[in-house]
Amino acid sequence: MAYNPFAIEGFKYRLVQGGVRPAYFVVNINTQVTYGGAVSDDLLPFNSHMFYLCRAAQLPGVDLDNVKVHFQGREVNIPGSKRYAPVTLRFLNDPQFSVRKRMETWVQRINNTDLNVRAQATDGLLGTVTVTQYSAEQQGGLIASAAGTLLDLIGGTTAAKALNGVKQFLPPKKLREYKFIGAYPRSIAAIDLNQDAGDTFEEFDVTFEYQYWKTSEDQLIGVGGIGRTEGFTRE
């Protein structure tokens, strides 16, 4: 049978597993900044709050600077360096101020309000923000331990035994993961209070600067090689 580009089945085939849904994501933040306890003690509860309280995130875009060079009266466009736009996360504010307190402490350790100094070396004040896109379709099968459950989604390990012995459905499949390297909170948005807003929840944005982002599929591609590399041919 001849191929029909207008056939609905062809379109449905491209949306296997129901397409990619913007609500199926998880955010983790890994940093050496401590909040009273050891780093390892802080990260698991911190990311468990993140799992439930992060309301919105972003999969990053990419921009290249453009360098214009004139040759014989004509403009020649040369691709330049990458530019990385800030990434913004939105959080619900819980009664414990779980995420907001930690973000405020992070900023305070970067620049102490009273002393105008940093609490530790710069590298220790940077972190990695990871945004993971999941499939809307659940993986098949059951498991009987903590591995592969919610603990893995929030950055936990099998050291947490609370779910051991309880059969759990496997989490959705990871589709793509973005890591924002060398990240730090540049701004924490204000929370507006209003006595007319009775049936809403407090939310706030945190904007992060970072050095660059990479995906779980990134590999180093040789520069200056001769021949075929990742689909590009050098003449």
Image (spheres, grey):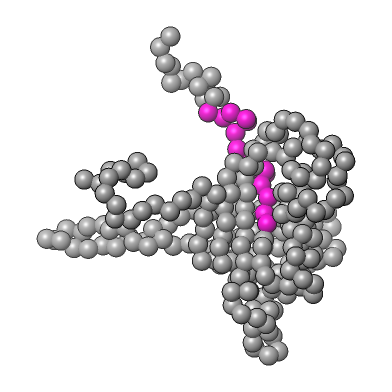
Residue 204, position as x, y percentages in the image: 71, 63
Question: Hey, which quadrant is residue 127 in on the image?
Answer: bottom right
Instruction: Specify whether residue 203 is in view.
Output: no
| 127 shown above or below 148 | below
Left or right, residue 222 beside residue 112: left
Nearer-the-camera pick, 138 or 229 = 229
The residue at the far left in this view is: 72
Q: Quadrant of the C terminus?
A: top left
Q: How many numbered marks does the figure carry?
A: 0
Question: Hey, which quadrant is residue 57 in on the image?
Answer: bottom right
Left or right, residue 191 beside residue 125: right
| 97 shown above or below 175 | below
Left or right, residue 214 beside residue 114: left
The span shown in magenta is: 14-28
Residue 153, position as x, y percentages in the image: 72, 49
Q: Residue at x 67, y 75 (%)?
A: 107
Nearer-the-camera pick, 46 or 147 = 147
Residue 33, position as x, y percentages in the image: 69, 72
